[in-house]
Structure formats: C-alpha cells, structure tokens
Image (cartoon, helix red, strand yellow):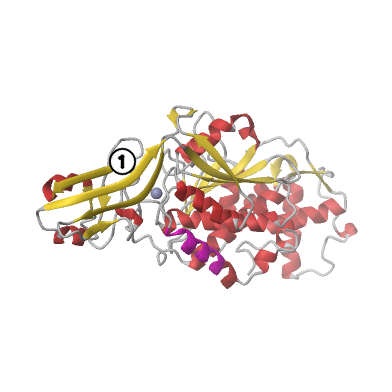
Amino acid sequence: MAAVYPNPSISAMNVDNPLKALEREGLERAMHDLIAELYPICRSITGEGVRETLRLIQKRMPLEMHEVPSGTQVFDWTVPLEWNVSDAYISNREGTRVVDFKAHNLHLMSYSVPARKKMRLEELRPHLFTLPDHPDWIPYRTSYYTENWGFCLRHADLEQLSDGEYNVVIDSSLQPGSLTYGETYLPGETTDEILISCHVCHPSLANDNLSGIAVAVILAQTIASHARRYSYRFLFVPGTIGSIAWLARNEHRVSRVKHGLVLTGVGDAGKVTYKRSRQGHAEIDQAMAHVLKHADGPYDIFDFSPYGYDERQYCSPGFNLPVGCFMRTPHGKYPEYHSSADNLDFVKPESLAQSYELCLSVFDLLEHNSTYINTNPKCEPQLGRRGLYRAIAGQQEKHSKELALLWVLSGSDGGHSLLDIADRAGVPFNQIFAAAMALVQVGLLEECLKPVKAHE
Ligand SMILES: [Zn+2]
C-alpha cells in the first residue's frame, strides 16, 4: 500500500521500500503486535519497565539506551529516585487479594512508596481511586513528585468491599538509580535533523502511548532503509522529565533540529489531529497541513498550547524548536483516556497504519521541499521550444502539468519554496515537485542555496 499522500515518481523514500512494499495488513499487524508485546509491562518514568520496553524496541531497530543518574539536575528539575515494584495488593481478613497489582498494573498508583499497613476501609478510602462514571474501568494515577501511595480499582469492586480491616502491602523500592531513555540517530546527507519523540512512561495503556512507540519504530525501520537528505533522531523518553533531561544534555546541538513531531495517541479510531509548533508557521506545520489537506479523510489542526505532551519542552521559549504534535483524538477528549479501557481493543490497526503513512508523507515532502530560482524571470520562457508544452491542445492531464510548470516558474523567485508554491496553487506538492524537476532539466530553474524568506 502506497503512502496516503502519493509521491510515486519522485520520491527517494518511495523507491526500493521493502517496508512499504508490505501489504497494508502486514504493516498493521507489525504495529499491533508490538503494542500487544509491550502492553503488560509496568512502566513508569524510571525503572526496569522502561528498560525492558527499550530492549524490546532494540530487537526491531538499533537503539542506544542512556541512563541519567537520580539526583542529576536538568534545568529546573531533578531526576528522581528510581521506582521499581515487585508486588502490591490489598487483601481482606481471609487473605484474599481484593486489589492486586499482579492482575493489572494500573491497580497501583505509579511511584507509590513502600507500605505495609493494616487499615479499616474508611482509613483506606483516601488512597483508593475509582471512576464512578465508568464503574468497570480502572483509572491511571501517578504521584511522581509527591511521596504518596494509592490503589486504583473498578468502582464496582469498591462497592463490593465490606467494612472491616484490610491488609495493605506495597513491595516497591524508591532508590538512587537512573532515568532511562532510548535514542536512535539515522544520519543523512546533512546534519540537519528531523526529531521524532514519543513517551515511554505509561504502564498498560495502549493508545497513550504504545501507539506512538509502534508508529515511531516502523517509521525508523522505513527511513533507515532509504537514502535521505535529513538526519533523523528518534527519542523514546519518559514524559516531561525525559525530554527535559534530553534537552539538558543536548543543548549544544538542538539547533540542528529543523523539524520535529511528538507522536502520541495515534491508534484510536478518531480523526487525525495536528497541534502546531509554538512557532506556528514552521515548515513542519506547513507540511503537515498540506499533507492532511490533500489526503483522504477528516482531520483537525489547532494552534500550540503549553499543555499536552513533550512538545511543551521542545517548544519552551528557550528552545522554541519547530516541533508539532501528531495525534488522533486529543488526550482527555476520549473517555477511555488514562483508564484500563485504553486497551488493545481500543487501538485500531488501520488507524495505526494511516498515522504511519501520514507521518511518512510529511517526511517525504520535507525531504523534497526546497527553494528554486527561475533563470528566465523576465516574461514567460517559451516552453514549447523545450518540449514542455503540449503539442495538441485540450488534453486534460497534460494541461494540469503545464499549469504546474507555470506555477513553479511564477513562484520561484528565491523567496518561496516549492511547498509555498504548491499551497498557493492549491495542488499537491508532488505535482509541483515533478514540474520543478522538469524545469531543472532544461535549465529554466536552479536550486537556490541561500533562499530569502519573502513571504507576502
Ligand atoms: Zn498520558
């Protein structure tokens, strides 16, 4: 199955593409299988769950694991103690586990401190979290930066608990260790980078964000097998503290990041959503809008806001990187968000595949977008003499090719990229690119190495 955004004849990333030569079904299965494999692991912002997750990713792509010691100062934050858990439960007098971490890892609030207590139900209640509106779902709760403990359970199960004494056991550890993140660098012809970042800190939640991990892995596999202008950097980081740690350690080279996407919640059945970078009119914002406009299906684009995922850090004013956030239904806008209902059934193979294809189309466009200059700018050049103008009038397909030639000649003043021209002409980028290549061949167009941004 070709990418949603068709770019067949011109794209370095669309030729010899073993991954995209896979049937759509194979692609869907690869992503859903990876999600199913990662789903049972108990992840948090630190700990063995993140390492195990990264090791499973390493089986599919080269990935470097970095460890940042607890206590490391990263801008205004400190890398926390490492959290691991071996067992946690609440049992009744008979010794029956009424809430059991081993049955579902969402049952334990993430970063719960160790505990061994006997408590009456009334004393226990402030530590119990449920979703009364969805009595069969287990909520997801964390307490990373405040010492606390808690259990999450189905409201229906809470209602079954009788008064009386319960035994609380949390065999967790909070000790000096490290924060772990994964990084993959795929060098291209230039050191200019495209950054793809996803968070790896959520436990058994499929859309948020095993879907982002799965799409990132398959994107990396695809991009690795192609010649490319840009270098690509993939980050698999714990949310917030992970991207902050990466930025703190890589401040000296973030200026290489020319475009970026945070991938999150890309597997639900809802429509595609893109949140622009803080810059608002970065090339990634323009490329994404263009691809979504010319692809099939509904979508939404909204402006940057300082809440959401790791784009908050990449776009903070001290960095202001051109990084947008690609998702489907935004977080908090679907009832299953941060609950046990965000499970393997909630992520749809066809949604994952479409998300992958759209991102790849955007990268493909960025790979080919450039600014050119018309070498014959005084009046129109005679295209017929150069074999570029139709011999017979009235052929519709040829007519659109000619219009594309005229748009490229008209727009190539050294201040407008091919994407600018495609947007102004209202035609897909690939047609404008094909026209540009034809004009380069006959010497009517030259790539402009120092374009002047001259937006009207
Ligand atoms: Zn989340």
Depth check: 335 or 205 in front? 205
Tell me which amino acid carries mark 1: Val
Where does the image place residue 114, in percent across and percent down from the top left?
Answer: 30, 42
Whether residue 320 appears in this view of the structure is no
The secondary structure that most of the magenta stretch takes on is helix
> Which of the 4 image quarters holds residue 271?
bottom left
Q: Is residue 373 left or right of residue 28?
A: right
Number of marks in picture: 1
Q: Is residue 157 magenta?
A: no
Q: Is residue 219 left or right of residue 417?
A: left
Depth check: 349 or 306 in front? 349
Whether residue 27 appears in this view of the structure is yes
* Residue range of the region highlighted in magenta in the rendering: 28-40
For mark 1, what is the residue? 113
Regarding mark 1 in the picture, which secondary structure is present there? loop
Tell me the residue at 45%/29% (across/down): 71
Tell me the residue at 59%/30% (across/down): 251
Image quarter (top left, top right, bottom left or bottom right) of the C terminus: top right
> Which of the 4 image quarters holds residue 405?
bottom right
